[in-house]
Amino acid sequence: MSDQTALHGLFGSDSRIINLGLENFAANAAASGASAVQVDWRLPAGGDQRAVAALDKLAAGAKVDIEAANAEGLRRILAAKPTIVGIGLARDVVPGMAQDLILHAGPPVSWEKMCGPLRGAVIGGLIYEGLAKTPAEAEALAASGQIRFDPCHHHDAVGPMAGVMTASMPVWIIENQTFGNRAYCTLNEGLGKVLRYGAYSEEVLERLRWMASDLAPILSDALQAKGPIDMKSIIAQVLQMGDEGHNRNRAGTSLIIRELAPYLVMLDYPKEKIAKVLSFLNANDHFFLNLTMPSAKCTVDAAAGIEGCSLITTMARNGTEFGIRLSGLSGRWFTGPAGVVDGLYLPGFGAADAARDIGDSVITETSGIGGFAMAAAPAIVKFVGGSPQDAIDITKRMYEICVGENNVYQIPVLDFRGTPTGIDVRKVVETGILPAINTGIAHKTPGIGMVGAGLVKPPENAFRDALIAFAEKYAR
Amino acid sequence: MSDQTALHGLFGSDSRIINLGLENFAANAAASGASAVQVDWRLPAGGDQRAVAALDKLAAGAKVDIEAANAEGLRRILAAKPTIVGIGLARDVVPGMAQDLILHAGPPVSWEKMCGPLRGAVIGGLIYEGLAKTPAEAEALAASGQIRFDPCHHHDAVGPMAGVMTASMPVWIIENQTFGNRAYCTLNEGLGKVLRYGAYSEEVLERLRWMASDLAPILSDALQAKGPIDMKSIIAQVLQMGDEGHNRNRAGTSLIIRELAPYLVMLDYPKEKIAKVLSFLNANDHFFLNLTMPSAKCTVDAAAGIEGCSLITTMARNGTEFGIRLSGLSGRWFTGPAGVVDGLYLPGFGAADAARDIGDSVITETSGIGGFAMAAAPAIVKFVGGSPQDAIDITKRMYEICVGENNVYQIPVLDFRGTPTGIDVRKVVETGILPAINTGIAHKTPGIGMVGAGLVKPPENAFRDALIAFAEKYAR
């Protein structure tokens, strides 16, 4: 007697079944002639008993008004006005920056635990700073204890991929003009063999030196002539031009070029130097990423440190661990293993070459763009995989874990609905819906560079641990 | 006894009805308890007996293989490679151009029958050429018979809105590098008070003079330094960046700026002049329109003159009439009254101010972009009205009147489906689905300018007349 026949004996055609859980049970019952309805229900928190207990405790009563705290967090995110105000050297403008300090992406990590591309970028950074002459010297210095490592996030900064920032690097200065706080990010180097993907060959270092000697001063002077640039307006526009602000930045890069070009041409530099800057920008569609990142950073930073607020104000990865921070639990990281990216690879590379998820660029998703705005950028699926419908579905799903919608960042194809904004860790844990993140993929070996791009799942336990700690502090 | 009750008597609940035609009949029958199915069927050719007879005759047998001719037409459209090759003065490059000749948009029209904005542009053009000193002088000259008027389309050219081109105006030279044919179009002046919307104040003329003295030579030199620009590739890209190539051109304008900027900065002009060019481009998102138009023109022109081909190779309006031309009926225009645009108005203006549908810009739709690609540009509805879903529906409907899909121009949100391409006049007449056109709206009085933008229906009889003439020539 087959299972199907057995089922038919149990549930005749008169049976009416409401099924929760495993879907094939309902399908089998229906096949046997019963009327079966599948309810889309999952165990809260995936059945994790500590997480369920934390949700229950918070629901039973909290020491503070969490909804009000979250509303204040959302209000601050929506009120943010990220603005490009200048370019400076990290040592001059980034708080706490020093010659013996290397900033990196993600939560804290020691040299011993760093992944390949982060090590590669540290090697490149030390040579760039003149602290080492060869990769071997740089590795020895990095391991010696004479160099300090710190997350960019501990210095009001963010960095894509490896996110390595050293004292002599030029950085964008973005100010949240509503609240006065600032965020910093290096200038984007382009794709392929670049420091942020862990490459450190002479070609990479040469480009970094040109960026400091020519690119940054020229852009800085053009910016001074033009005056501050309203990034909130530009990000709003690029969402109507097929960008999502993380892995598709062709529109954003174009808008920055056309804003600056009339001022660049007026500068007192040899015109060959200005032409090289314009050619570099034109050849690098990711140039805008290093502007959306600090814009997102100074936006969500304004919502950090609110007592009782369960919104996520940081997500970041160092290639070893993925970490988050909550507004109401200032300064504490909650981490899990960095994920494996599911994506498309450049010719000649495959999944076996890939480093794990890395970079602070997920700050874009934290602020409600990037993966959260993928519906605005259907063409991105040619870069990260999937279909345009997937991109739309991903954005729609993100509304379920957010407390609000952006008032300025809109998605045309969703009838100009605001992007999902203000990720509530309670909603993430309860629904099991993880923040959608699209990302580049670095080679796992230091010195090689980019091998692809795709989508990645953050580790669920980081969110559960954060929720449990939040409940410990705030539940009655 | 109400109608409903009477109906109930006629059609009891046992009745099963298939309804064709008026939908409320099916609705009433259903309300009375009958099972009614509404079939989406309309009278072919709207019941126009001459048009139906023409369709029947063609279906019964033709002197040539129409399907093969249309396949050849589509092949040529898809094979086209529109390329920017330079900028020249109309008198030097446009075939047949002369000092006493004014080219205009749409099918032929006499001074007496010209609409307000076209008259305004003619007045401006005559003053610009130095043939008249005042608007009154210009009107008298235009009416005197000493000035010849001709459609742009009779000179391998196209012009937006009034489409006025005079001998001293600089024009883009676009070459279809597959077939060697060229198309010409003036440079875009921006929005607001501009010649193409019928304004001719000193501000308008001053800008035209600057365009000839500075803008055109500077862009021309940058273009010579850079080399030809592949418009097919750029149009393909802008369709992934929220443009549709007719009324939304922010991405296209941005891409042209970033391509040319590195060459502009190298030119031997005073840098103030180059900066002014870059500022002008940055302030004018429609700059790219005057590049998509001649690109579309040289694309469909390659498919003109094919014996037995029922594809539409021209659609154009002069503000008085809307006209089309078919590939298989070389040189013949079929016209109807220009439509009233249904759209959004600038503050202070309304439908009572609007001129009728005008301009050659519908060449974009003729080639399969513009209104046909609206699904790629959902944000355009903020400019022309409607919802993003309307934009998607409009594109989907256009597949029903086209013989193919573009191989390079793709719409991400439709899973990268090619844009509907190759409009078959038989399909238009049979289905009654008219080509979707989005457009700007000019003030009906000469000298004022733009008042809004929207969607417009072309006159059905132009398509029916063309079909009837086509059947007369080709049916057995």
Image (spheres, coloured by chain):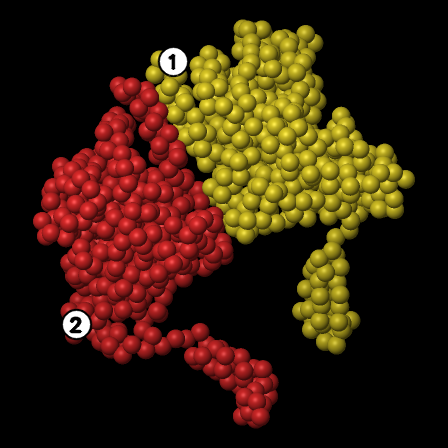
Chain colours: A yellow, B red
Image x and y of residue B40, in percent: 44, 74
Q: Quadrant of the C terminus of chain A?
A: top right
In the rendered picture of this protein, how many numbered marks are placed on residues?
A: 2
Image x and y of residue A456, in percent: 61, 38
Q: Residue furthest right?
A: A476
Secondary structure, mark 1, is: loop
Image x and y of residue B433, in percent: 36, 66
Q: Quadrant of the N terminus of chain A?
A: bottom right
* Residue A239 in sight here: yes
Which residue type carries mark 1? Tyr
Q: Which mark is residue A445?
A: none
Judging by the rendered image, the residue that carries numbered circle 2 is: B472
**What residue do we see at 69% from left, 73% from top?**
A33
Q: Are marks 2 and 1 on the same chain?
A: no
Judging by the rendered image, the residue that carries numbered circle 1 is: A269
**What residue do we see at 59% from left, 19% from top?**
A164
Q: Is residue B213 above or below residue A225?
A: below
The Cα–Cα distance between marks 2 and 1, rounded to whole angstroms, is 69 Å
> Front-most of B226 and A452?
B226
Is disc 2 surrounded by few (<14), some (14 to 19) or many (20+) residues within 10 Å? few
* Left or right: B269 in relation to A162: left
Q: Is residue A267 above or below residue B100?
A: above
